[in-house]
Image: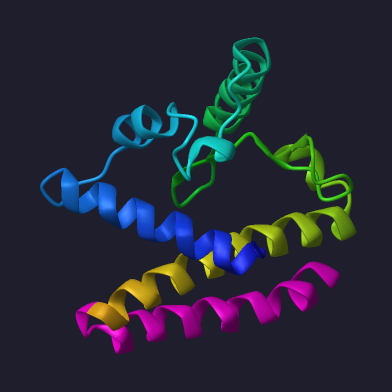
Amino acid sequence: MNPHEEHERIAAHLQWLHDKHDNTLDAGIVVRDARRVRSPLHACFEWDDAVAGQQYRLEQARHLIRSVRIVIQTKQATYRAPAYVSDPRTRHGYVSTVQLRDSKDEARAALLAEFVLVRGLLERARGIARVLGLESEVEALLHGVVEVESHVPQALAA
């Protein structure tokens, strides 16, 4: 089975679970179903508890790192910002947001990476908005983000 067919099979099974559970779906329903070896979802999960436990602890550590905020005080206002962001050099670690001020190239790369995330979320929201008939509202937000994103390289080059 090719990846597209596998994706379709998984999507159909999730829809079946959704329908079976009174038009609702949650992680518990999915995991209970996936425990069955014959479930189309079974291979999507790590069933070795030692490996899964380590993966979960790593995810908890990532959440912990992303949860830390710093406070920036200006004459106009007080702001809270992430203390750490994805390291633009490696993409698998984190770097101090304050430390990024020392390197315009790394600061630019980190900020552009954040805009990529925002764009991805807005593109997801646009897909949902299409279904709901609200696409133009989300499209305006997406256009604004793309516009600001295009100015980041020039703003940090100065």
- Residue ranking furthest to the front: 38
Percent from the top left, x then y, of residue 114?
A: 63, 58
Q: Quadrant of the N terminus?
A: bottom right
Q: In the image, what residue occupies the spot 37% across and 53% down?
A: 13
Q: Quadrant of the C terminus?
A: bottom right
Q: 123 or 26, which lies in front? A: 26
Specify the segment rendered in magenta: 132-158
Percent from the top left, x then y, of residue 122?
A: 45, 70
Residue 48: say if magenta.
no
Q: How many marks?
A: 0
What colour scheme was applied to this rendering of the protein?
Answer: rainbow
Q: In the image, what residue occupies the spot 28% across and 39% down?
A: 26
Task: Examine the rendered structure and indicate whether residue 117 appears above or below residue 143.
Answer: above
Percent from the top left, x then y, of residue 3?
A: 65, 63
Work out whether residue 158 can be spotted.
no
Left or right: where 88 falls relative to 46: right
Left or right: where 21 falls relative to 113: left
Residue 145: say if magenta.
yes
Work out whether residue 98 can be spotted.
yes
Percent from the top left, x then y, of residue 65?
A: 62, 27
Left or right: where 99 falls relative to 58: right
- Residue ranking furthest to the top: 50
Task: Examine the rendered structure and indicate whether residue 101 appears above or below residue 155.
Answer: above
- Residue ranking furthest to the left: 22
Characterize the magenta stretch by its predominant secondary structure. Answer: helix
Hey, which quadrant is residue 95 in on the image?
top right
Q: 55 or 120, which lies in front? A: 55
Hey, which quadrant is residue 85 in on the image?
top right
Q: In the image, what residue occupies the spot 10% across and 47% down?
A: 22
Q: In the image, what residue occupies the spot 78% across and 78% down?
A: 154
